[in-house]
Amino acid sequence: QVQLVESGGGLVQPGGSLRLSCAASTNIFSLYRMGWYRQAPGEQREFVAGITSGGSTNYADSVKGRLIISRDAAKKTVYLQMNSLKPEDTAVYYCNALNIMAARYEYWGQGTQVTVSS
């Protein structure tokens, strides 16, 4: 069982920045693709950014150039650096871990709220 704990959410003005963190209970980066998803009120959960076991990254078109995913294996932590935030980025952000060899092993964090508003 893998536990993921997100932190770093909050209220920020448009154009501002936040950094989200996702701490894993064990070092899983070599076996899991890590990702960030978000869910706005009344909307479906959507993919935001992902990083593979090899370190390759990909992003949703809506966040390219503004959000950056990274990881620190020593700290067992994945980050989402969020820059130039817009009101439409307001959502609950979830950390995800997907086993690359067995998709049935998938874990989610509890989510952290990000609100972009003046």
Image (cartoon, rainbow, N blue to C red):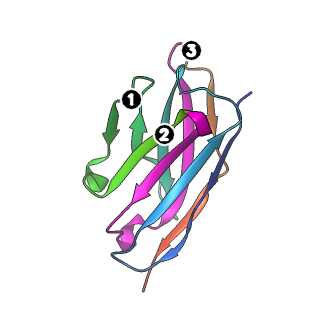
Name which residue type carries label 2.
Answer: Arg
Q: Which residue is mark 2?
A: 71
C-alpha gap between disc 1 and disc 3: 19 Å
Q: Is residue 64 above or below residue 98?
A: below
- State how many labels appear: 3
Q: Secondary structure at mark 2?
A: strand
Residue drawn at x 42%, y 56% is 81
| Lateral position of residue 57 relative to residue 113, left or right | left
Q: Which residue is mark 1?
A: 55
Name which residue type carries label 1.
Answer: Gly
| Lateral position of residue 61 relative to residue 111, left or right | left
Q: Earlier in the sequence, mark 1 or mark 3?
A: 1
Q: Nearer the viewer, mark 3 or mark 2?
A: 2
Give the quadrant of residue 29: top right
Q: Nearer the viewer, residue 50 or 47?
A: 50
Residue drawn at x 69%, y 30% is 26
Residue drawn at x 58%, y 64% is 113
**Coordinates of residue 22 in the picture (x, y in percent):** 59, 46
